[in-house]
Image (cartoon, grey):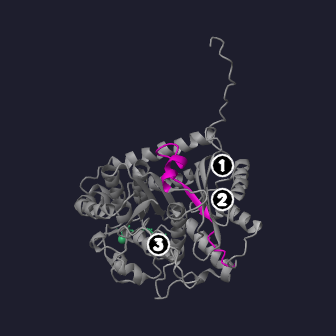
Amino acid sequence: MSEFVVIQVGQCGNQIGSALWPLILQEYDINLYSEDKKKTGDTLTPKPLSSFFNTSSKSDLACGTLAELINNKVKARAVCIDMEDSVVARFRQGVLKDIFDKKCFITNYPGSGNNWAEGYYEYGPIYAEKILSSIKHAVERCDSLHGFLLLFSTGGGTGSGLGTFVLKLLADCYPEIERFVACVYPTGTEDVVTCPYNMGFATKELLDNATCVFPVENRSLLDIVERQAKKQSGDISSLYTPFNDMNNIIVNMLLHVTSGSRFPGSLNFDMNELNTNMVPFPKLNFLSSGFNPCPYSSLKNGKKPSKQLKDELFVASCSRLNQLVKVDPLGPKSVLMATTLIGRGGFSLSDMNGYVEKIQNKGKFAPWAFKSIKLGLCDVPPKNATLAMFSLHNTTSVVNLFDHIHGQFTKLYKKKAHVHHYTKISGFDRDFFLDCHESFRGVINAYREIENMSPVKIPRLTPLKDL
Ligand SMILES: Nc1nc2c(ncn2[C@@H]2O[C@H](COP(=O)(O)OP(=O)(O)OP(=O)(O)O)[C@@H](O)[C@H]2O)c(=O)[nH]1
Ligand SMILES: [Mg+2]
């Protein structure tokens, strides 16, 4: 089982983290609020917690309650960084306080002022040593570290600036270890005026230094949660705290994508296969993810899910309505470079092969991609669901996201608005604006080229007479 160190940076990164840890524990049947063990038959199946927790080498540790975890000195493999203290402070006090290693909290006051340069060039060098030492502490407690998983928003100063600084540190100090990033793009909720610059500079770093990026657009999440709220109560005013619902979707995406690394399955899909299968070129590393956000809890234990339900979940996972970024992976404008499908719970290989055929018939693939689709079957469904289907696409339509950010970045920069906040930071060079603009042009052109590629004609083999 692969191990991961989660590094959560800034307010958003730590808010996603605070939704992530309870849900991971729930997937292992660990009850946070009760001393009771799992009720079903009272026998606990040992499940290796080691992917996200340091269990002090008791790899088959079977815990039913949080108290047992704490007694066994189990610690989350987490590093929590923010340049203000309020969100990280909740980990010091909340119900999970004892599963966090206090050596891995790094905070300051009062934040990076919504300025990428402040996070990257001011706090980065000041905190580099402290951050590296916390990361080293977490890394030394791993037996088979596979990857770092970074969580942050690209819209503010700390997550985007310090988050991408940490990403670069990892690339320099741990070049062999994969760097996965789940990052929020506050599109549609741009409440920060400098957001276009922050998103722009952070994106350049993500293209340069991340192995795989799981981008999430707030406008996509908002659409999903509003649709769900309307379905459930017909009223979206019930969404008092949309960030909670939105972050739950991000967390579920992370649980799905890492499910094969945490649980067994008849067709195992480990995170170590992700980069090879999904990223054909280093800078085309942004992957769109989708799944049905509603758990199918209505199925009684033991009752076989119908084919219709399974098919519905497959269709939902590839639908544009359920993508966490604004793309339509099987739409007319999308050219697929790679796809992965992960079935959790009661899917069979023959179900999966049927879905592969559907995608191959409907989707348009890059001529060199051989229409290949990576499959994974994970035995354990998400908590409160009988089964789930998760899809990941490397599609050229993610260019929409780059176009959107580049457009906003250029609009602001044409007027040189807010530029002085960045140029006043020591280490930040005015030319970085132009470099960033060039980086966007490069990646946008790369996607467009693949979109416009005509199918490659492979010449027929002719016999070699001289042999
Ligand atoms: N989906 C989601 N978006 C968030 C969340 N928190 C903040 N955002 C968005 O992310 C952007 C700012 O990111 P923050 O994480 O608050 O900023 P920060 O990284 O702490 O940086 P500074 O406060 O500027 O130092 C805003 O545009 C918010 O709309 C969250 O919990 N979930
Ligand atoms: Mg903040």
The residue wearing badge 2 is: 318
Residue 209 is situated, as x and y percent measured from the top left of the image, at 39, 50
Magenta stretch encompasses residue 179: no
The residue wearing badge 3 is: 20
Q: How crowded is mark 2: few (under 14 residues within 10 Å), some or many (20 or more)?
A: many
Residue 188 can be seen, yes or no:
no
Please, what is the three-letter code of the amino acid marked with disc 2?
Answer: Cys
Q: Which residues, given as a range, are shown in magenta?
A: 271-298
Quarter the C terminus occupies: top right
Q: How far apart are marks 3 and 2 (CA)?
A: 24 Å
Magenta stretch encompasses residue 276: yes
Marked residue nearer the N-terminal end (3 or 1)? 3
Residue lying at the far bottom of the rendered structure: 35
Q: Residues within 10 Å of mark 1 (few under 14, many from 20)?
A: some
Asked which secondary structure carries label 2, the reply is helix
State which mark lies toward you, 1 or 2.
Answer: 2
